Amino acid sequence: MDKMMVLKCLMLLFPAVIFLQSGLDKLFKMEGNKTYILSVFKKTFLKPISGTLFYLLMILELACGMMAITGFFTLVSRDDETIGYFTFLLSVITLTGLLAGQRIACDYAGAAGIIPYLILAFLGLYLFSV
């Protein structure tokens, strides 16, 4: 295993950890998390669809996390980077949606906290693109 492969494997652990933890937290503590999301968007134009957005976010997070694990194993076992690439593409889309939601809710500190994750996701996307 060369150094670039090690870096790519380690990069795939990033979305596996953050998205699986967050998605599973939403799944197992659904009522509390959904209530929080509804309260965040109660004064925005997203209020009517905030419940749907909660479920969409949970599905996206779980998908990113599972894709990252699958991408890790396909990279190690078959030297195939395809799933890794799509993991980071979906990660960038998911994090951009989270960022937009935080901005719409006027939670600028929360939005700023997403930026480091988004930078790492873009780095992973770049790494799996070259």
Image (cartoon, rainbow, N blue to C red):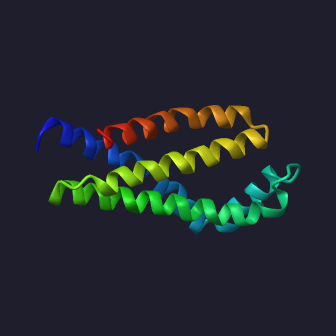
- Position above or below: 115 against 8: above
12 relative to 109 in the view: left or right: left
Residue 32 pos. (x, y %): 70, 62
- Position above or below: 88 against 53: above
Residue that lies at the very extreme toward the front in this rendered image: 130
Q: Is residue 16 visible?
A: no
Residue that lies at the very extreme toward the right in this rendered image: 43
- Position above or below: 101 against 46: above
Q: Is residue 126 visible?
A: yes
The picture quadrant where one finds residue 83 is bottom left
101 relative to 41 in the view: left or right: left
Residue 114 pos. (x, y %): 58, 37
How many labels sit on residues? 0
Q: Residue at x 63, y 48 (%)?
A: 97
Residue 59 pos. (x, y %): 55, 65
From the viewer's side, name the closer residue of 73 and 26: 73
84 relative to 42 in the view: left or right: left
The picture quadrant where one finds residue 123 is top left
Residue 112 pos. (x, y %): 63, 31
The picture quadrant where one finds residue 60 is bottom right
129 relative to 93 in the view: left or right: left
Q: Residue at x 49, y 62 (%)?
A: 62
From the viewer's side, name the closer residue of 82 and 117: 82
Q: Residue at x 71, y 46 (%)?
A: 101
Quadrant that contains the C terminus: top left
Quadrant that contains the N terminus: top left
Q: Residue at x 52, y 63 (%)?
A: 24
